[in-house]
Image: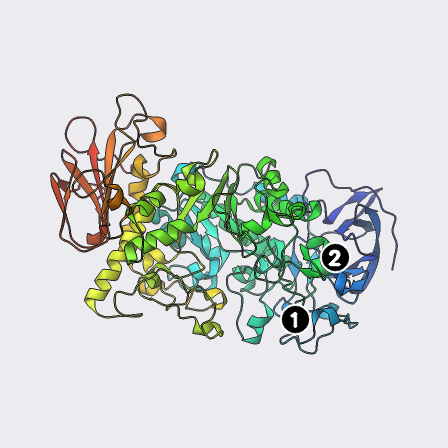
Amino acid sequence: MTHHTVLPDPMPPHAGPAFGAHPGRLAGQDGTVFSVWAPHASGLAVCLFGTDAHPTGERRVALAPDGDGAWRAFVPGVGPGERYGLRADGPWQPEAGHRFNPARLLLDPWALALTGDTTRLALETGHRCADPLTPSCAWQAHQPDPNDNAARMPRCVVIDVAAELAAGRAIAPAPPVPAGRVLVYEAHVKALTRQHPGVPEHQRGTYAALAHPAVIDHLQRLGVTTVCLLPVHQHISERHLLARGLVNHWGYNTLNAFAPEPSYAAATGGHDPATAAQAAAVRAECRQAVDALHRAGIEVVLDVVFNHTCESDLDGPTLSWRGLGQTDWYAMAPGGVPHNFTGTGNSLASSRPRVLQWVLDSLRWWVQAYGVDGFRFDLATTLARDGVLDHGFNPHHPLLSAMAQDPSLRHVRLIAEPWDIGPGGHRTGGFPPGWLEWNDAFRDQVRAFWLGHPGSRSELATRQCASADRFAAGPRSPLASVNFLTAHDGFTLADLTAYAHKHNHANGEDNRDGHSHNLSANAGVEGPSDDPHVQARRGQWRRALLATLLCAQGTPQLLAGDEIGHSQQGNNNAYCQDNPLTWLDWARADTELAVFTGGLAALRRRHPGLRHTQRFTGRPPAPGQPPDIVWHDVDGQPPSSAAWNSTEHRTLTAVICVGEHGEAPTERLLLVWHPGDGPVSLTLPSGPWQHVLDSAAARVSLDEAPLAEGQLILHAPGLHLLVQGLHGSGPAPTPPAP
């Protein structure tokens, strides 16, 4: 190995992550500082392979200890475009968790770009294994594989950090979306756009397609303010999927937390970049998508996976973190085995300072270099498990506290999936102020109410009012509750109303995978049906569910494709289906449902009573004003305690009277949830009412609306919204469209 004197870091502060590769100039020489964290390693080397234009054989340069587990070296003559990897020497002691193997070429956890094929990286184990697809050796009996694997490994790439940050600053600024007007749209880059007829064929399924006017126009017509993209960090497929000829479609298996997934790039035809120039083109295309969405008034939130890595369990690969120090990067259980709070084989030790720093560096990089506006944290409970609390959940976890005060992160949207599969893992409502959280109770109890499962009116009312039973503790706004009906994980809305059971046989696990408790219904026929009565009932359910979502207090989240009736044929765990099963079927889109959904979003924007930023109290907000919310039974009287908790008589109404941003109210809203068949005669509060929403009849009236007074006869299942002005006895005037 060639040794070089360790010199001070040439990079100015806050110019990208402190670790990784930083080109710069020292003592009159151009070169690159390589910094690696590997506290238990006995030796570290950076392996240089030259540039695309001037490839070389492997040249190893030793890194010197730099204190506190860090290693560093300045290498003259190395600059942007240089390809590199790492090798770490140290103990092989599986029982203690140490699995160092210098025969493995490792990826830098802080690498900002990669080149090379990643297709079968799940098989690059650090131990001897006759067949990594079907491991059979006990973990404690693993022995290091002495065969060098550099020829099969991708390369990290040195990039110009300052140029990347400048490109990030050139992105159009984020649109000013008030918290109370957020409508989240959860989407997969490829699935959303792969079959869109308005996008040129060579762009479909890519970042370029996401930026295409045809896609953006659809989002704008829906009223979407915030696109939440399933993981775009570069990822790989797990070994069990390779064994079945499948791929990880969703992307929750991160290989690199700083680089965009290249399979979503038109610039490379969906392939891994072979050169640094191709990797740069992928980065540019990703930025262009963010820029285009910003210019259209739409925020970009990324679904990020920091609870585990793609190295899986101890039969999995040694690609980066494990090879640099498994006991340092992962939360360890006794016997040298990583904890598995995620169900994926390992859990990151996010309470350790350098691991925490790696997470923060990645988040800052995506904000600063790619212009993103927030993050949704997969299995966020794992991120808040604290090593000093025996890996228990800590709402004041150092990582959460660091994000709250970090200058680059404290203003972005932070959304938690507030559970994992570990002990005490369900923590909905337990994250600190400023966080939004997925609310699975809304999902379950709204489904139950409309689709005939056990549930009371009091439960529906609680979910409609942003689940105060879960989120009211402390200064949590109603907006903290992210209300959703469906998500990538589970049935689509079309399948929720067409299948009573999951149908996951295509996944190759004999239908054992995926949830069985779906609270779904099929209207008497499992799967597709030509029966007009079945189709009508399913349509009523879908519209009622969507209306409930868009008329509920909190932050609504819509799953991409639900607005056009997309079906996955009953598969509720389609993580490995990168094919027309998951690609939105635009050719058979239910355009009427899409128009209806856009109308619901317009009603939400128009009426502050549908998106109140304070919790309802049932009392007048100011002297002389009516109560902010009053609940009624069908006879116009408050429901009795027995009726409130009964599952038999389930029609419910609420009168809401609040103003915009604390101003005095100018209207009152009457919401009616009617899950059964009629006829049911509903007594209306006094005066004429504009009947602006009838989900049973698929009607949203944004201009002229029919009037109702005295009684409203309810027939089919549906949600109704009626509006009455407070000035005089007439209905509320129709305001201009926003």
Q: Position of residue 118 (x, y in %)?
A: 63, 66
Q: Residues within 10 Å of mark 2 (few under 14, many from 20)?
A: many
Q: Position of residue 33 (x, y in %)?
A: 78, 48
What's the coloring here? Answer: rainbow
Q: Which residue is mark 2?
A: 325
Give the residue drawn at x 16%, y 26%: 728
- Of the residues shown, which amino acid type is indicated by label 1? Leu
* Quadrant holding the C terminus: top left
Asked if residue 244 lies left or right of residue 488, the reply is right
Residue 103 falls in image quadrant? bottom right
Q: Which residue is mark 1?
A: 123
Q: Which element type, helix, strand or loop, lies under badge 2?
A: helix
Mark 2 or mark 1, which is nearer the start of the sequence? 1
Asked if residue 264 lies left or right of residue 83, the reply is left
Q: Which mark is residue 260?
A: none
Q: Residue furthest front?
A: 642
Q: Which element type, helix, strand or loop, lies under badge 1?
A: helix
- Of the residues shown, which amino acid type is indicated by label 2? Gly
Q: Position of residue 672 (x, y in %)?
A: 23, 44
Q: CA distance from mark 1 to mark 2?
A: 19 Å
Asked if residue 651 lies left or right of residue 407, the reply is left
Asked if residue 494 lies left or right of residue 10, the reply is left
Q: Is residue 627 above or below residue 524?
A: above
Give the residue drawn at x 45%, y 72%: 511
Q: Residue furthest top?
A: 623
Q: Position of residue 229 (x, y in %)?
A: 48, 53
Q: Residues within 10 Å of mark 1 (few under 14, many from 20)?
A: many
- Residue 127 in sight here: no
Residue nearest the viewer, comparing 640 with 556: 640
Give the residue drawn at x 19%, y 26%: 727
